């Protein structure tokens, strides 16, 4: 760079980068980016002519002083720039190639500082006949004028960027090893490339894998991303928290502001329910752990709570409660997989509901917690009509279902017994499971599937009132077909009636939502 090229802004920002033209330096998040002299000059020229297609000849003339030189000089410089600044140099976002062998700097820039244009001071055109600066020249060189000009330029750039910037994060996509975050209109907000590939199988079957909550209290939603590795049989999942920047600077490729790898918070094992004669526990709860669900909330009291359900192959299931800094507040251990969750005001109470399967009972379950009091382990002391519990979460060396974490703090536990279709041959299913639910102020809607088949399972949808009394139970078409087949085959001794579904819901004693009888 020569001094003549310093006309205009001294410091220019784009994305995470800052180009200081006077110091001949490129920085990324306050760290110097190594770039040779000529590529740095090419980058400067493209940035100062942003959104204008620039030919190789123009670059040869401006940087090397001769447009007839080998164009390969420009191509090599562009390659070096892309390696330095692009997330994926093969799919450039900063410097794009346009028809006609031209290049265009495609990312919005923010101007931090302006300086006098070299050649203004002392130029003949700015002098009056007596050799003193004219009033107009004096006015133009006034620091106040430069400050006002810079402010107006920055304001103009800001307005353009603001109205053309994408909105808040609302959707995620994954591609090989890249996370792409988009807004509600499908416009890209930012992307980030990871060093290893994602598990296609697990991302295909476990959606969504992003959740959105304000982590830093600025009123803008941030991104929680469950990283599911290609090598997930050896490594568990990691939860990343990406903090979204201000609206003008959202086209970023951020590093995670927060990250948490899930490990057991206590020395736990899986063992029999309450057999005092057992000398040793059964199966230790070992890694890897996979994230089954992430349920965030910004509460009215200003607190952020993130409830994360992580599991191993079978059981048990850790429910970790995190604050906005990913610090664990408490944990609860469940004998099963709770994959679904929802914060809700129900019956006048602020609660989080979790649903899935309790593998101790091999039964579909829905439980509720006070969000500020989630801890302990699931209680398997009750005998259900359909099940006797098979195992529970134990503390190492302990007996019975209570670990050193203490009794579970569930405010309500509901179990859903298997239907006659699930119990009869040839559809005999070992367990059932909650596959979705919705909670509003005075109603709970729960869908229960028979068995573990994902392809159009037989399901029953239950509607319950504010005191968990059954309002209606509706089986799907698959359930009715199977019921009819079993009747015709003589494997069921009755025709279907909606009445047979009503006794299948079991609300365990102590549920706070059950109406107290006077």
Image (spheres, rainbow, N blue to C red):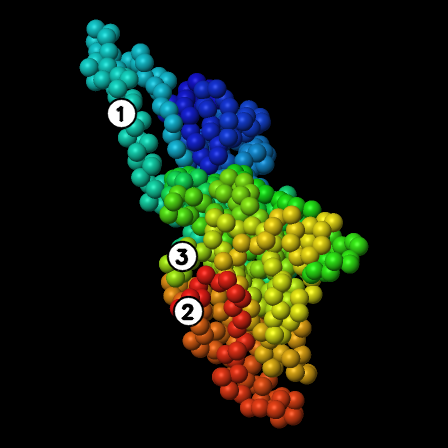
Q: Nearer the viewer, residue 136 or 449?
A: 449
Residue at 62% from the left image edge and 89% from the top image edge = 492
Badge 2: how crowded within 10 Å, few (<14), some, or many (20+)? few
Can I make out residue 234 in this image?
Answer: no
Question: Vertically, is 108 above or below 66?
Answer: below
User: Is residue 516 rendered to the left or right of residue 272?
Assistant: left
Q: Residue furthest front?
A: 518
The C terminus - image quarter: bottom left
Residue receiving disc 1: 148
- Among the 4 quarters of the image, the one containing residue 126: top left
Residue receiving disc 3: 349
Task: Where is residue 123? Give x, y as percent.
Answer: 31, 14
Mark closer to the chain start, 3 or 2: 3
| Label 1 residue SS | helix
Residue receiving disc 2: 517
- Among the 4 quarters of the image, the one containing residue 491: bottom right
Task: Tell me the distance, in whole angstroms, between the alpha carbons under discs 2 and 1.
Answer: 74 Å
Residue 114 circle label? none
Badge 3: how crowded within 10 Å, few (<14), some, or many (20+)? few
Residue at 56% from the left image edge and 37% from the top image edge = 82
Task: Tell me the distance, in whole angstroms, between the alpha carbons under discs 3 and 2.
Answer: 20 Å
Badge 1: how crowded within 10 Å, few (<14), some, or many (20+)? few
Question: Vertically, is 322 above or below 14?
Answer: below
Task: Tell me the distance, in whole angstroms, between the alpha carbons under discs 3 and 1.
Answer: 55 Å
User: Is residue 134 rendered to the left or right of residue 449?
Assistant: left
């Amino acid at each position: 760079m020569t001094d003549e090229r310093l006309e205009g802004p001294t410091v220019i920002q784009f994305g995470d980068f800052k180009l200081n033209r006077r110091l001949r330096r490129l920085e990324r998040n306050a760290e110097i980016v190594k770039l040779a002299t000529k590529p740095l000059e090419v980058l400067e020229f493209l940035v100062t002519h942003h959104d204008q297609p620039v030919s190789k000849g123009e670059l040869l003339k401006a940087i090397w002083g001769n447009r007839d030189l080998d164009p390969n000089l420009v191509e090599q410089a562009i390659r070096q720039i892309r390696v330095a600044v692009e997330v994926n140099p093969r799919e450039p976002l900063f410097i794009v190639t346009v028809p006609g062998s031209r290049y265009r700097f495609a990312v919005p820039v923010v101007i931090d500082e302006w300086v006098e244009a070299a050649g203004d001071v002392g130029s003949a055109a700015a002098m009056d006949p007596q050799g003193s600066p004219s009033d107009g020249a004096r006015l133009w060189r006034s620091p106040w004028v430069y400050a006002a000009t810079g402010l107006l330029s920055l304001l103009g750039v800001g307005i353009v960027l603001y109205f053309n910037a994408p909105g808040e994060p609302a959707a995620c996509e994954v591609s090989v090893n890249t996370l792409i975050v988009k807004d509600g209109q499908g416009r890209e907000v930012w992307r980030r490339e990871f060093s290893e590939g994602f598990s296609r199988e697990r991302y295909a079957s476990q959606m969504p894998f992003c959740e959105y909550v304000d982590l830093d209290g600025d009123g803008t939603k941030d991104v929680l991303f469950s990283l599911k590795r290609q090598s997930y049989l050896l490594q568990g999942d990691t939860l990343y928290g990406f903090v979204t920047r201000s609206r003008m600077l959202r086209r970023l490729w951020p590093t995670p502001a927060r990250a948490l790898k899930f490990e057991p918070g206590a020395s736990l094992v899986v063992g029999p329910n309450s057999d005092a004669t057992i000398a040793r526990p059964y199966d230790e709860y070992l890694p890897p752990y996979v994230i089954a669900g992430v349920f965030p909330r910004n509460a009215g009291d200003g607190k952020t709570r993130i409830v994360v359900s992580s599991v191993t192959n079978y059981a048990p299931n850790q429910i970790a409660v995190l604050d906005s800094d990913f610090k664990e507040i408490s944990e609860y251990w469940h004998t099963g997989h709770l994959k679904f969750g929802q914060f809700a005001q129900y019956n006048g109470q602020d609660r989080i509901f979790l649903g899935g399967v309790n593998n101790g009972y091999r039964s579909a379950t829905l439980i509720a917690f006070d969000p500020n009091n989630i801890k302990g382990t699931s209680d398997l002391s009750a005998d259900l009509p359909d099940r006797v519990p098979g195992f529970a979460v134990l503390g190492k060396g302990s007996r019975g279902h209570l670990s050193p974490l203490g009794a579970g703090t569930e405010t309500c536990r509901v179990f859903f017994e298997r239907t006659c279709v699930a119990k009869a041959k040839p559809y005999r299913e070992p367990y059932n499971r909650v596959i979705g639910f919705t909670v509003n102020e005075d109603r709970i809607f729960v869908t229960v599937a028979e068995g573990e088949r994902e392809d159009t399972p037989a399901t029953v949808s239950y509607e319950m009132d504010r005191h968990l009394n059954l309002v209606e139970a509706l089986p799907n078409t698959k359930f009715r077909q199977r019921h009819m087949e079993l009747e015709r085959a003589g494997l069921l001794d009755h025709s279907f009636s909606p009445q047979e579904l009503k006794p299948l819901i079991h609300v365990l004693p102590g549920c706070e939502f059950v109406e107290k009888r006077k």
